[in-house]
Image (tube, rainbow, N blue to C red):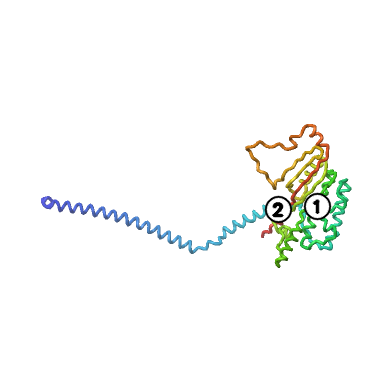
């Protein structure tokens, strides 16, 4: 004790140094422990990334199996919808020019006979949009399949007229695609190039969907006109009306509108406008159902492509 008292400052210094060494040692132990832990985590991460770099991740057999199953389901759904939509459509038909001319003549004769048998009035020697071919002009070979298709569509549409008790067929027009095709051929010829394919007229069967536009004008009673529209909607061909106009010549009343392919945006801030039919008086409503009206229709006939083959 006397020694400690004699060297009191030395004793205090040694004690302080011991405490300081203990604190530094503890800190070093804590830092070394964290270092070892982080080093182990770093080594594990390096090992994992090396494994990932060495793996052959593409293609993954499990992913391929799942994607093939999804693709097969999607193709089945598409084929089911395509089969339902295209069940009654008329396909283009290959035919020689020498065969097309008598086919055209016989088909036009059948259409006229059907209209006459149904007491439907129509222009004398009417050709239903095939004037130049009925006059003796031979079609280009590449246009014949679609011309045959349009001719069959025309026959099916005109068959509905006598069934609906339509009194008079005023006009019938088809999409004269060959005119646009001929213009492209002429333009390409002037440039010394081959003519490009004319859209759906070239290979309609290879497209997912294509349309052909037709126009018809006829005169009938109101009930017959509505019956014609109903029969048109029930046909096996997929038909969409794009525009219509119904006119009563005696009452000077016209009702027109666009189909779903030409939507009209409605302004909700303004009250809905009344149609001409809503503004008719009671007397005109009674007479309207008894008189003949002039009907003009434009419609698209849809053609859907073939089903997708899946192995």
State the residue in front, 215 or 73: 215
User: Helix, strand, or loop for circle 2?
Assistant: helix
State the residue in front, 28 or 258: 258
- Point out which mark residue 28 bears: none
For the residues labelled 2 and 1, the Cα–Cα distance comes to: 23 Å
State the residue in front, 7 or 169: 169
Residue 94 percent location from the top left of the image: 79, 61
| Quadrant (top left/top right/bottom left/bottom right) for the C terminus | bottom right
Going 72% across and 45% down the picture, which residue do you hit? 258
Extreme residue toward the top, this view? 282
Going 74% across and 46% down the picture, which residue do you hit? 243
Instruction: Sort mark 1 into few (<14), some (14-19) or many (20+) by Cα contacts within 10 Å.
Output: many
Of the two numbered discs 2 and 1 on the same chain, state the one appearing first in sequence.
Answer: 2
Residue 47 percent location from the top left of the image: 44, 61
User: Helix, strand, or loop for circle 1?
Assistant: helix
Instruction: Sort mark 2 into few (<14), some (14-19) or many (20+) by Cα contacts within 10 Å.
Output: some
Count of labels shown? 2
Extreme residue toward the bottom, this view? 192
Is 14 on the left or on the right of 205, as rendered? left
Q: List the residue tagged with mark 2.
A: 82
Going 37% across and 57% down the picture, which residue do you hit? 38
State the residue in front, 9 or 37: 9
Residue 91 percent location from the top left of the image: 77, 56
Going 76% across and 34% down the picture, which residue do you hit? 280
Residue 14 percent location from the top left of the image: 18, 54
* Labels 2 & 1 near each other (Cβ < 8 A): no
Q: List the residue tagged with mark 1.
A: 154
Of circles 2 and 1, which is in front? 1
């Amino acid at each position: 004790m006397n020694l400690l008292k004699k060297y009191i400052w030395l004793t205090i210094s040694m004690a302080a140094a011991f405490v300081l060494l203990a604190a530094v040692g503890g800190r070093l132990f804590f830092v070394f422990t964290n270092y070892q832990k982080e080093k182990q985590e770093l080594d594990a991460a390096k090992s994992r990334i090396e494994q990932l770099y060495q793996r052959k991740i593409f293609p993954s057999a499990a992913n391929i199996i799942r994607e093939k199953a999804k693709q097969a389901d999607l193709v089945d759904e598409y084929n089911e919808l395509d089969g339902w939509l295209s069940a009654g459509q008329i396909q283009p038909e290959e035919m020689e020019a020498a065969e097309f001319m008598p086919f055209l003549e016989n088909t036009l004769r059948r259409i006229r006979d059907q209209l006459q048998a149904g007491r439907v009035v129509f222009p004398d020697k009417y050709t239903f949009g095939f004037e130049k071919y009925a006059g003796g002009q031979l079609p280009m070979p590449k246009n014949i399949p679609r011309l045959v298709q349009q001719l069959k569509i025309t026959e099916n549409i005109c068959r509905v007229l006598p069934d609906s008790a339509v009194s008079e067929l005023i006009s019938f027009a088809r999409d004269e695609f060959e005119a646009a095709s001929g213009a492209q051929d002429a333009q390409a010829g002037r440039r010394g190039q081959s003519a490009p394919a004319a859209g759906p007229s070239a290979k309609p069967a290879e497209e997912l969907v294509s349309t052909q536009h037709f126009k018809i004008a006829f005169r009938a009673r109101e009930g017959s006109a509505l019956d014609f529209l109903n029969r048109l909607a029930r046909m096996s061909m997929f038909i969409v009306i794009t525009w219509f106009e119904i006119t009563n010549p005696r009452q000077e009343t016209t009702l027109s509108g666009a189909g779903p392919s030409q939507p009209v945006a409605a302004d909700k801030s303004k009250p809905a406008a009344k149609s001409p039919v809503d503004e008719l008086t009671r007397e005109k409503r009674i007479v309207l159902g008894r008189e003949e009206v002039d009907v003009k229709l434009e419609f698209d006939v849809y053609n859907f492509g073939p089903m997708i083959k899946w192995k």
